[in-house]
Image (cartoon, rainbow, N blue to C red):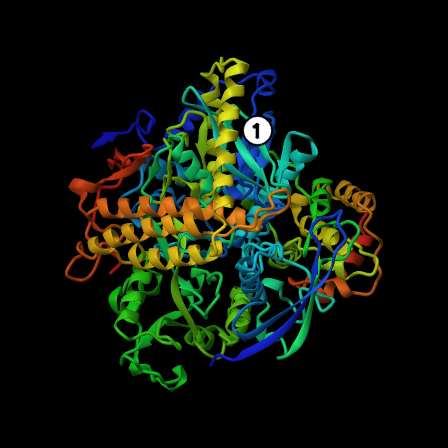
Amino acid sequence: MSYSLDPCLPLGTLEGAWERIQKGLPSIPLGKKNEIHIVVVGGGLSGSSAAATLAEQGFPVKLITYNDSPRRAHSVAAQGGINAAKRMRKDDCDGVNELFEDTLRGGDFRAREASCRRLAEISSSIIDQCVAQGVPFAREYDGLLSTRRFGGALVSRTFYARGQTGQQLLYGAYQSLMRQVARRRIELLPRRDVIEFIKLNGVIRGVVTRNLLNGKLEVFRAHVVILATGGYSNVYFLSTNSMKSNASAIWRAHKQGAFFANPAFTQIHPTCIPLGGEYQSKLTLMSESLRNDGRIWVPKRNYDKRDPSGISESERDYFLERLYPSYGNMVPRDVASRRAKELCDRGFGVGHDGRSVYLDLRDAIQRKGSEEIKSKYGNLLEMYERITGEDPLSMPMRIYPAPHYTMGGLWVDYNLMSTLPGLFVLGEANCTVHGANRLGANALLQCLADGYFIAPSSINAWLLGQAFSASSREIKHACQDAMENAKKRIDNLINVQGEIPVDTFHRELGELMIKRCGIIRNESGLLAGLEEVKLLEQKFHHQVRIPSENDCPNLELEKALRVADFLELAQLMLLDALSRKESCGAHFREEYQTTEGEALRDDEKYSHIAAWEHVSGSDSIKHLENLSFNLLKLNKRSYK
Amino acid sequence: MIKRISLNFRIWRQKSQSIKGRFEYYALKDLSTDLSLLEALDKLNEELIINGDRPINFDHDCREGICGSCGFLVNGQPHGPKDATTICQLYLRNFRDQTTVTLEPWKVKAFPVIQDLVVDRSSLDRLIMSGGACSDDVGKAPDANLLKVSQDDAFSSFEAATCIGCGACIASCRNASASLFVAAKLAHLGQLPQGQSLRSERTSQMKQQMISEKFGSCSNNLDCEAVCPKEISANWISWMNSEDG
């Protein structure tokens, strides 16, 4: 059964809607703000920026992170850049339309139009904000900001700081955050995992955390909880995410009533360093900005084991340039990944296991000189060499797609509030602007749009209508319930005392998910995947081994709590992939493709966001947010 | 071609700050040299868990050298033998077969041990807190292109800003000085027009905080620069010393 959802869209024309709303917003008196408690979970780009901004506005904020410092959050690893529609010189057009259209088209028309429009409209002020914080973006000779081109775009609008843009943006937000910590507007609560939510009369009222140093369960009451906890690519075990990135906070919120939207929309990034060998713990991304200068190819003959230098020009298949003459190597990520996988499956792959393709800088080096290439991509090239032991300036790099980003996440309305009143979700953790495939350099943009601008304003507006009348006895009860649930889950896991370490289960889950719900999916595989995950989940709860000491750091328990949630989330991903009987963006169902092997959408039936409601002891219920497109008409995505 | 290697590990084990620690010995045989050092520790931990022992605790997260979480001494050297490399990017091909590798936590007063190889580096957060920011609140920023920055200044500022806050510079210094960490932050903000308004205030506050956190004074040995995984130049320390504040 399906129900439809109201995303609270703005009234009137979409152009300029956000600005109109801002002008009409009354503000909360400062004295009132002091009595509101806001808990932010996650110290990455969206969490830090939201916490800093809310504190600047006068709210007392608590920030919870599993890291020892917010500066470690995974946003730090974003390499390439941040998109913005910014007028650079007097006669330029502002580019808002183009960014809006590329975002919507890049997401294959499965994102909410109003949110994409707003993202493009506020993008320019984000760059201003970052520069004011001291983010050292690359500059042109005349001292103006410099941009480069990214996949899925025909214009150059990506601002960058070498290959470390995420790091620099995060430090900007982190420094603003620490300024507020110094002023005692923000309390920093590091080395804690959120493992349960406090809910009263259907409204979120706080979180239960586990202190990772001493195992203590702690309660933090709140009037507003912000989840900025990132994505769930680690469901695949091997991904480009940090080792500890996890879905537990959003999954626990989902089980308390927050709907989970489009869980099957996961992005497999085309340019990652291929798998090395046994016990490998993660995959490393090479920024797709490399596709500006690198040409992607495989040998024309399959099972060609020759050294790349021995393969002449006429024996090389630059397959993206061949298949997509206008975008070439700059096609969006989903397209590049799928084409690489197909060729490897057919025996054209290179490397010791045939599971990679070449990304070749040779022509760019000949044209521009190795100095220029080094200055553009220095740290990326060094990283590649450290990991593989091969020099990318003298031989082509080998790359292969790896799980990277999750477009799905908790469903939020236009104001970033989930279906649980008081729970706001930001950044990769929500499901808003990226549709079925995220455009390169839009992740950082979305994080900062959510954190600096949208959430602070929406939260103000929401608070104006709230009374918070619950008695302290009721709240106390709700806290106790949440504590007990958390304690029970921990005890159950520790008490198994089986013989298999957590990582073994996680690795197995990952292998299964990449096979069944990875770059290419089909019905029989997804059905088999569901059975396999259920079995694995049972095995996990009967055979996992966790050291029982819980009054000091217990890494295995941390991991087990996360993997237990991944095992549940994986089933919802498979279910969602099964129920979306079309191909769109990164969700490629083998059964639904054009004769040329491109994704075949079914706009009649699937022009919606699927938001799943958890029902205890029964099947999840699917709700629909139907999508309509007014500014940009639905059309076939083509990068030919 | 995959090469194999066998290593003996001598690892500092300490259950908590209040309990005395000691070295324990572990042998790992027949490992692929394409394994990273941390992946070798993952493997060792799996064996420990199966045997009912407490796994070795070490900080890590991104495993691509950018988050700054990892960091301990490898044979006495912060981040180990390879230049410009964090521990997570250290592969077994950087070690010799059949040797003993000693792993121990940063030995710095301002970084108390939490467990095994994990230390508390919150003093670095407090250094940033004391003044490592610009002053503008959200919504008040002028057009970014109004402030022109030359390519050289932007790049020089960026280079200083790449510090990942791992603490290796401090762990390598015989005085446990945080001079390079602080100088890098001052140089990042002090070279940009937007960092000018608080420039001397920032310098004096951060210097003062270094003293209150009990970091030592610069030992002038340049070990900090040698171990910095981001190759931040110790020249910034002289630059800092010529700053007002």
Relative image position of residue A352 (x, y in whole percent): 40, 77
Is residue A250 something one can see in this rendering? yes
Chain letter for mark 1:
A
**Residue, x 50% and y 52% (percent of image)?**
A545
Q: Nearer the viewer, residue A603 or B90?
A: B90
Dot 1 corresponds to which residue?
A220
Relative image position of residue A359 (x, y in whole percent): 40, 71
Is residue A27 something one can see in this rendering? no
A547 lies above or below A255: below
Relative image position of residue A500 (x, y in whole percent): 47, 56
Find residue B203 and report its image quarter: top right
Q: Nearer the viewer, residue A214 or A254?
A: A214
A610 lies above or below A27: below
Q: Secondary structure at mark 1?
A: strand
Question: What amino acid does circle 1 point to?
Answer: Phe
Looking at the image, how many numbered discs can be counted on the residues? Answer: 1
> As drawn, which residue projects farthest toward the bottom?
A310
Residue A590 shown left or right of residue A144 in the figure: left
A349 lies above or below B64: below
Find residue A7 and report its image quarter: top left
How many residues crowd around disc 1 within 10 Å: few (fewer than 14), some, or many (20 or more)? some
Relative image position of residue A596 (x, y in whole percent): 18, 62
Q: Nearer the viewer, residue A93 or B119?
A: B119
Q: Quadrant of the C terminus of chain B?
A: top right
Q: Nearer the viewer, residue A100 or A460?
A: A460
